[in-house]
Structures are given as structure tokens and as C-alpha cells.
Amino acid sequence: MAGMVDRLRSSGKLGIARIVLVSVALVSLLLVPLSGNDYWLRILTFIFMFAIMAEGWNVIGGLTGYTAFGQVAWFGMGAYSVAIGMTKWKLSFWPSLGLACLVPTVAAAIIGLGILRLRGHYFAISTLALGIAMGELIKNLDYFGGASGLSLPIGPSFTYFYYLMLAGMILSVLAVWAISRSRFGYALYAIRENETAASTLGINTTYYKTTAYAISALLTGLAGGIYAYWTSFIDAPTVFSIVFNVDMVVMVVLGGAGTIFGPVIGAFILEGLNEVLGSTFLELHAIIFGAVIVLIVLFMPEGLSGLVSQGRFSVRKFVSNLKTYKV
Amino acid sequence: MKDVVLRAENLKKTFGALAATNDVSFELREGEILGLIGPTGAGKTTLVNLLTGVDKPSEGRVEFGGKDITGWAPHRVGSTGLSRTFQVVKPFLHMSVQENVTVGALFGQGQRKSMNTARERADEVLELVELAPKADAPAASLTLQDRKRLELAKALAADPTALLLDEVMAGLHATEIENAISLVRRIGEGGVSVVVIEHVMKAIMQLCDRIIVLDQGAIIAEGEPEQVVRDPAVIRAYLGERWAERMEQDGEENRSEA
């Protein structure tokens, strides 16, 4: 996972080519619902959802260098906020979605103050435990529907959710872009690179880490909130699924941790791959997924964006990585 | 006499039974370059850690700019105008040289809010430490000499009132040391009070207004460079008892011959 902490230096600058590419992609995505193909609409909505989560993870894992593995806690919290808001409190969707952003943000800020004292593997393990514990807790509370889950009012059309998720994805990309070129972003990079040096330069590391964690929870909660209304039924095993946890991390690492578009690219490739593999090789798909992760770490620890910016596929890097990781 | 910028009072730090710093008191005055020397393991770096909040003192007090900063978190110390470098340099490897220094300018005592003014400050400092041509290079690509300069530049960009330099010359060869000496002198002339921790005696002798000698956690000598290096206690700490005796005898013979 050495590539996890690598950031592309050029990623903050938007070249003409990139602007054109992004505009074309955006316009095509806006036009997709005109085709009326519900299958593709559904898959793309899923991809957007993962892209939001991946960008959320990117804020804490990519920019700040804290490998959080329990982000699904915020996703589930967002999903349950919408579900509880709409079914128990009889709120409409938008205020509920507001809760889906607010609740995980506040929770992450409070929990983060405690667990962000841990570093490296210890932080990763504690966040993983957080994600699992949250799922178990919700499953055992009757107020949250217990093991049988919650049914939400039926939402508007697929097209509505398609655009909503797309807007969420654009928002999350803009958030990461804004952070990456700001004072706040520089504090995060400094923390990722060397926390002791960052603090002696005057950076209040606790404050910045916690804020980054809260922002990542906000984005992840947003995705969870939209998801709940979209599927109109949620239960704890689904929205606190450990698979989501792993997926969002792998997407970021594949695309390029700490970059602006990397997580989105990772989401498109991996979720696309998932769809193909899942329908064709139901049993093998986890194995292929695992192989992909190993190959990323060995061949391109800076992700696909690193590959593109360096302009070549480095065999020498592959060999040196083989030695480093004693494969 | 000039105002005291930084004052340590009876600082003590124990790790288990070992007193790494034992009852250390000293003052750094405005515009002064103070040398801190002592054999390896004397407690120099521990002292810097105590002053900058990286370690908490077991006893004693640290005063900076008239404020009691004992036990402050490192970031509070850093943003109040007391900056430091690390003996084992800590560059932000995956950032460019300019980005590294910009971090110092954004935070530290300057607390610049705008990215542009921070970048301008970074460019100024890079000019001063002669790293400007490498502004866009990744920090990971720098040589040791340049990494030491970068370490200095980051701390300087933070607009410190006082700067603690923990062995910025260690590992450099003769020419590089000359460059470093003139650089530290320029920094001092810029109005920053400096504590220079160094094993390179040439640098200490040329730069410092005053020297403090640490041995086994305690101050054993203090004064002007010329006078301190002749101090028998200092010679004993560095070279051992027998050498100190021989030096004293030589001294007496020289005097009787004269």
C-alpha cells in the first residue's frame, strides 16, 4: 500500500486537455438518461455512489494519509438518517438528506478526536472495528427496525436518482479540488508526509485531522442518504457491508490516492469490472478482485493517475517493488 | 543588555532513572547566536525537544517572549514564533520544494491566510537559502545538503522570532559547511535569534556570540567561544581526564618558558 500516500504533484493544475476531457465526459453523462436504458442508468448510479464514497475516503486516506477502513459506518449512518427521518419523523426527503450529511459529520468529529490519536495500522484496525460495531449496534436496536430493516416511501424515477447521485459526485470532486489547493489542504499534506514536522511548523494536527475525517464522513453519509431513498429499503447488513468498505479504498488506490479525479476513475473501472465479473463469474469475482489489488500495489503504487502522469509503465519500479515487498 | 527572548529555568527530563536533561537554565537574548555543544548523548536534542513542546519537561519552566510556554503543544510553540529544525531532517517528500516551504509560510508565526502571499514568502526564503532553482523539484530528489537547506527554509518561512538549529551541518563536507555558516550568519543578521547545536567546532567558533556546553544532561561551561574551548571541564568532557591533565601541564610549561 505504499502508493496510498503518494500524491501527484501536478494534480492541482487543470490543463486544457483535462478540462475538455472532463466537459465531454460530463455532457455524455448528462445525456445518458435520454437513452431510456434502465440497466445502464442503475449501474451508472451505483458508480456515482461509489465515486462519492471514494472521494470521501480520499480526503482522509489520500490527502491526510490516514487509512480509514470503517467508512461504511458513515454510509450506514447516512442511510439510516434518511430512513428514520422519512419513516419515523415524517420529514420529507431533503431535510432527511440534510440529516444524512450532518449526523455522520458530527459523529466523525467526536469519534475522530479519540481515534485519530492512533497512527498506521492501529488507526486502520480501530476504524474497521468502528464500522462493524456500528452495524451490529443498529441491527440490535428495535427503533432502527432491528434485523428486519426499514422500508422507505417509494421515491421518484430512476432518472431522478441518477441526476442526484451525479450531482453528489460532482460536488465531491469539487470539494476535493478546492481542498487540494487550499491552506487547509496543505495542512493535510504536511500531516500525511510527516506529522511531527507539521506540528512544529505550527499546524494544529488534531484540528485538521478531525476536520478532514468529518468531511470524509459528510460525503460518505451523503451517498448513504441518497442510496436509502433510491432503494427504498435498507437493513444493517447491506448498508454497513464490509464489501463497501474495501471497495472504496481499492477504487482510490487504483485511481490514484490524493488525486482529484483518481477516485472517480477508480470507481468507474472497478464498479464496471464488478458488474461484468459479478454477472459472468459469480464465484471467481472476489479472487480476480484480489489479484487486481496485488497488481496495483506492485505495478503502479501511485495508481492509474500516476501511470498517466509519468507517461510510462515502469518495469523497473515493478522489480524494485517486488524486492521491497519481498514477494 | 538586550532583552531575553527565550529562557529555560531548571529544566529537567527523566526517562526512567536516566536524567537526560538535568537542571538546565540558560537565556537566549535578542539577535544573539548562541552555540550549544556537548559530546554525543549530552542531551542537546532532548533540550530542544523540551523547548519546543515535542517532549514535556519533568520539572522546570520554559519562557518565550515573556510568556510561560512550558508544556505547550508543538503547534502552539511553532505558531508563537519559536521554530526548529530536526537533526534527522523531515522533508515532506512527496511535495515540491516550494510546497514544503509554503507550508511553513502558511502556518508558523506568520499565519498567512492567502496561498499567494505564502508562495511569495516561500520564494523569498528559497532565494535566501539558495534553493530557488530547485523550487519545483520534488523534495525526495534532493541531496543531503539541499535537504538540510530545505529543513532550514521551512522553519524560516514560519517567520520565527527565535530559531533552534539542531545539527544542520552534520554530514556536510567542508565547502558545504562554509555555505551553511554564511547562511546561518545571514539569518542572524536578518534579526532572528538563533541557537546553533553543532558538532562542527569551526562553525561554532565562527558564528557564536556565546557557547553553552552540555555534558550528561547538565551545563558544565558557558561563555565566549575562545574562553569555553580552553575550559578544563570542557576538555575533560570531550577528551577524558588524562588529556585534560596533559593540556594543563602543557599550558604551565608554555607559561614558564615565556
Image (cartoon, coloured by chain):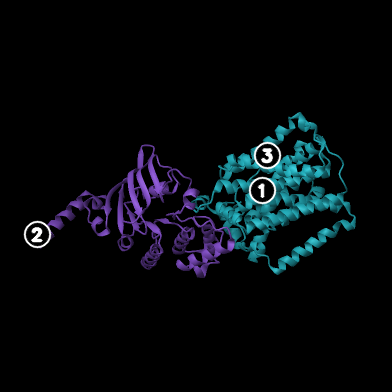
Q: Kindly indicate which chain is depicted in purple in the rendered structure.
A: B
Q: Amino acid at mark 3?
A: Gly
Residue at 88% in and 48% down:
A157
Q: What distance separates the C-alpha of mark 2 from that of mark 1?
A: 79 Å
Q: Amino acid at mark 2?
A: Ser
Residue at 65% in and 44% down:
A69
Callout 2 and callout 1 share a chain: no
Does B236 appear above or below A236?
below
Q: Is residue A107 visible?
A: yes
Q: What distance separates the C-alpha of mark 3 from that of mark 2?
A: 83 Å
Q: Is residue B31 left or right of residue A96?
A: left
Closer mark to the observer between disc 2 and disc 1: 1
Q: Colour of chain A?
A: cyan
Chain assignment, label 3? A
10 Å neighbourhood of mark 2: few (<14), some, or many (≥20)? few
- Nearer the observer, B74 or B217: B74
Give the residue pinned by disc 3.
Answer: A131
Give the residue pinned by disc 1.
Answer: A215
Q: Could you tell me residue B112's position as x and y percent?
A: 55, 58
Q: Could you tell me residue A26's position as x and y percent?
A: 79, 61
Return the mark for residue B256. 2
Callout 3 and callout 1 share a chain: yes
Does B213 appear above or below A8?
above
Q: Is residue B134 left or right of residue A153?
A: left
Does A61 appear above or below B190?
above
Q: Amino acid at mark 1?
A: Ile
Chain assignment, label 1? A
Query: Quadrant of the rendered structure where residue B61 is?
Result: top left
Disc 2, SS:
helix
Q: Could you tell me residue B66's position as x and y percent?
A: 40, 49
Q: Are marks 3 and 2 in contact (CB under 8 Å)?
A: no
